[in-house]
Amino acid sequence: MTLPQDPFILLSYVNTQLRDNFSSLEAFCEDAGVPATEICSKLEQAGFQYDPQLRQFR
């Protein structure tokens, strides 16, 4: 799966997927075929951190 390259669009996309379709970041990444470290790295560079209790990047 090709994920959005823009960090703000990626943020919106991932958070929407986590809210609507997946119980965890790991489940989303497994389905998308993308390492969680890749998503976390891109979003951390834009200033966002993953909150596992809320299941979203903030």
Image: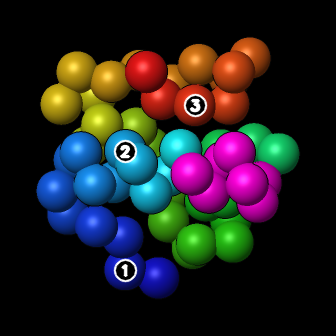
Q: What element carries label 1?
A: loop
Magenta-span inclusion, residue 50: no
Q: Name the residue under label 2.
A: 11
Q: Residue lying furthest right in this view?
A: 23
Cα separation, mark 2 vs mark 3, equals 9 Å
Residue 33: quarter of image: bottom right
Picture coordinates of residue 17, whole percent (x, y): 62, 57
Magenta-span inclusion, residue 19: yes
Circle nearer the N terminus (2, 1): 1
Badge 1: residue crowd in 10 Å (few <14, some 14–19, many ≥20): few
Residue 46: quarter of image: top left
Q: Report the span colored magenta.
A: 16-22
Identity, as a three-letter code, of the amino acid under mark 3? Gln
Q: Name the residue under label 3.
A: 56
Identity, as a three-letter code, of the amino acid under mark 2? Leu
Q: Quadrant of the C terminus?
A: top left
